[in-house]
Amino acid sequence: MSIKRTILVTGGTGYIGSHASVQLIEAGFEVIILDNLCNSKLSVLERIHGITGYYPEFINGDIRDKKTLADLFSKYKIHGVLHFAGLKAVGESEKYPLKYYDNNVLGSINLLEAMCLAGINTIVFSSSAVVYGNTDDVQYTENMTLNPINTYGLNKKMVEDFLRDIYRSNNRWGIALLRYFNPIGAHSSGLIGEDPNQVPNNLLPLIAQVAVNQRNEVLVFGNDYNTPDGTGLRDYIHVEDLVHGHILALEKILSNPGLLTLNLGTGRAHSVLEVIQAFEKASSRKIPFKFTNRRDGDLAVYFANASLANKTLGWKPKHNLDRMCEDSWRWQSNNPLGFPG
């Protein structure tokens, strides 16, 4: 009988982390979640149990706390880490850069130091397409120059740099840097989904909150881009497709250590108005919106070239925009105020 491998999921009660925890459990892994609950709720654990019949081990702690990490790695035999913990609002990162460097960069350094001390050398890092920054190309490939234009993007690039340096110093590490685009959707059960604590920074939760009358309208930033309908075009990916890429990457580097750098996106861009229309179709509700000025740093269009993930992992996204909106609506309509607590 094979022994189950144990995976630490930092930020495991958050939006992407909770979906990843579910898929890890379903794939036969033991799951330990470390989260300080600054952007999530403890009731997520009940929902994970509702889907899987399993309660993951939970530690209420912070990756900036070296003692918490040391105690965790000494208590449990951990085989690998999925690292989602961190702050993720671009606008907030510009307003409070030190807060973001403290959480996202220093916290990641502490985590990596603790892993080194514990002899754990497998990590999947939740990176982002924001590391590419402004570029003349609209389809992003992994070998493009990295030129992030905001603090959040710089955070992600710095952690990627640390991980590349670690691999160069010791190629027994298994490291996956997964750059993903715009995750939306929710688990098909409707039990877990995106539940921002404050005003949403992303389009889909804003649309969903308008649909359940938590907000009056969606602000659309710019309608004068050089695109078919004047609004920005983005690559949206279903969160379940996204985390499936994480599971495949984890299994790859557990069995064959190395350094992977992969885009996770659909390779297709949808406009803001297309997303609103798809959500109206899914919810059978009208979504009021209003055009306002462009935001600094927003690009007209960008999307992923994810052919390398397909070649390396056999990964391919399954869900289209309609399915993303249907699952988002199921989550939001069943949980108009988000998670309990």
Image: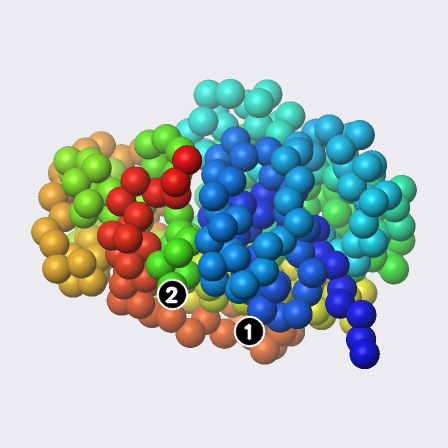
- Quadrant (top left, top right, bottom left, bottom right) of the C terminus: top left
Q: Position of residue 131 (x, y in %)?
A: 55, 45
User: Helix, strand or loop at disc 1?
Assistant: loop
What is the spatial separation of the Cα atoms under label 2 and label 1, in whole angstroms? 19 Å
Asked if one can make out residue 245 in the rendered structure from this viewpoint, the answer is: no
Residue that appears at 83% across and 45% down: 75
Residue 55: image location, x then y, percent: 59, 55
| Residue 121 image position (x, y, % from top left) | 82, 54
Residue 191 is marked as none
In the foreground, 43 or 232: 43
Q: Is residue 165 visible?
A: yes
- Give the residue type that dot 2 points to: Ser
Judge the density around disc 2: few (<14), some (14-19), many (≥20) Cα neighbours within 10 Å: some
Determine which residue is flagged by label 1: 315
Q: Which residue is mark 2?
A: 188
Q: Seen in the image, is 100 located left or right of residue 138?
A: right
| Residue in the picture at 39% in, 43% down | 339
Badges 2 and 1: C-beta atoms under 8 Å apart? no
Of 29 and 256, the residue lying toward us: 29
Q: Secondary structure at mark 2?
A: loop
